[in-house]
Structures are given as structure tokens and as C-alpha cells.
Amino acid sequence: MPTMGALHSGHLSLVVRSAAENDLTVVSIFVNPTQFNDKNDLKNYPRTLDADCELLETAGCNIVFAPSVEEMYPTPDTRKFDFGTLETVMEGAFRPGHFNGVAQIVSKLFDAVQPTRAYFGEKDFQQVAIIKKMVEMLQYPLQIVVCPIVREESGLAKSSRNELLSAEERKKAAIISRTLTESRNFVPEKSVANVKAWVIAQINAVLEVEYFEIVDGNTLQPIADWAETDFAVGCVAAYCGKVRLIDNIKY
Ligand code: PAF
């Protein structure tokens, strides 16, 4: 399980599942500089190694791999991955270079650990698609296991970034999941365009939406009509103050 630390119960659900399905569970904790396109985001990313290790022990992790930047990048990684249209939308469009950095580090971690299975959370819906594509491109002999989003009581998707929210902001941030959940009631009667506009307006009343797209869950390309796919997914990124949050919902 590759992680960037600041572990929460979402991460731990992956560890528990891995411990149940495998003989040995290795969790990496590494705040990967090459996937941050915003220096402040990298600087402010929560780092809680000691607490993380304690949590991991209780969840059934056998080995924590917490390398330094120098160990993972003794020389700059100049590899450029081409994920085609999977990376030109949503996170890929708003965080240029992000998925290249994710692919760089995840491939290095796969090379180091050589897992039979690797576990990822579905909150990062586009990341999962990119990593599956990378596994196919580099022919890694491993299975990607995708685990459901774990939510706070308010519905807010668990994220290490939630720790950066004030109590007030945390309450406000619940508008994201509340809106996504409600929007399912309009499908398929209301058009894709109408649902999109409604979701954006609802969340914008409280936070600041960066994007909300309704896409085909396999290709990640925006759809214009519900009939285009039987796997429509709504993906959102929104700012709550300075904190950028993402979430998604299957229609
Ligand atoms: O999802 C994350 O926390 C990171 O993108 C990952 C997969 C650990 C790579 O640094």
C-alpha cells in the first residue's frame, strides 16, 4: 500500500483488507515531491510518521517502508509517461505533471517491494485509472485492488487534507458529499448538463468548485447523455478555504 502518511481510517481500511488477503502487508509512507505542482501544498502536507507507525501496527501492517527523498530519487527521475486522454481531464488538467509524478513513485515502489497485490482508495478515482494503465503499460505482474471511500460521519470523504480544515470548515466541507448523494435522485430524469449545473451551484454556495465532471468511469471522458455509458461517475474538486478536496459518486 503506497501512502503519503498522515494516515486515517480510510487508509487503515486498506491495511486491514490487505492483512486479511495476504501473508505480508507492506505500507510505504513517502510524501512524493514529484507529484506536487504546488510548493506550498508539499510544504504544508501533514507529516505524522510516529503516529502513523502506531496505527499501522494495530491494523496488521508487517513492514513500514519510509524512505527519504534521496533514497527514492538519487538522481532526478526524467521518465515521462503518456496516459493519453486519461490524464488530460480533471486532476490531470488542473494539476499538470501530477500523474507523471504519481506514476514515477508508484513504479519505483512496485520495483522495490514487488507486491502481488497493491491497494488503492477509490476517492482518488482518476489516480486508480492511471495506475491501472501504468501497470498495463509496464506489465507489472500484480493486481490492483480498489477499496471503497471511507467517510466521516458528516459524509465528508476521509482525507489527510481534512486535518488542515478548521472545525467550521470541516462542517462546511460536508456539502460536497451531501450534494453528490442528492444528485443521484435526479438521474436519469434530468439531463447531464442540468445535474452538472445543479451540483456546481449547490457546492459553490458554500465552497469554491474547481471542477465537477460527469464522466464515463472507464475512459474518464465527460459524457453528454446518460445513455452513453452504464458507468457514469461524477468527480469533483473544490476548495474549502485553502484546502483542496476531491470526491466522487457513481450514478
Ligand atoms: O494517493 C496517494 O496518497 C499518493 O498519490 C500515492 C499513491 C501514495 C503516491 O504517492
Image: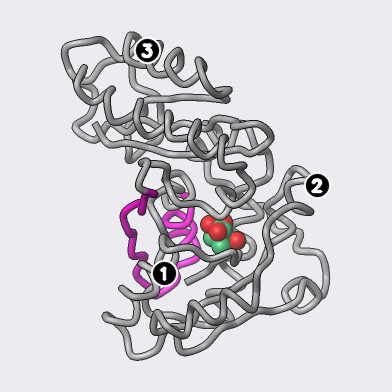
Q: CA distance from mark 1 to mark 3?
A: 34 Å
Q: Quadrant of ligand 1?
A: bottom right
Dot 1 lies on which element? helix
Magenta-span inclusion, residue 196: no
Q: Determine the image quadrant of residue 232.
A: top left
Please rate how many residues cluster around mark 3, counting C-alpha atoms within 10 Å: few if below 14, some from 14 to 19, many from 20: some
Name the residue type under label 1: Leu
Q: Which residue appears at 74% of the width and 58% of the height? A: 33
Q: Which residue appears at 24% of the width and 35% of the height? A: 231
**Residue 39: mark:** 2
Q: Is residue 47 left or right of residue 199?
A: right
* Marks 2 and 1 in Cβ contact (< 8 Å): no
| Residue underneath mark 3 | 198
Q: Which residues are magenta?
A: 130-152
Q: Determine the image quadrant of residue 22.
A: bottom left
Q: Position of residue 126 (x, y in %)?
A: 46, 44
Q: Position of residue 123 (x, y in %)?
A: 42, 48
Dot 2 lies on which element? helix
**Residue 222: mark:** none
| Residue underneath mark 1 | 12
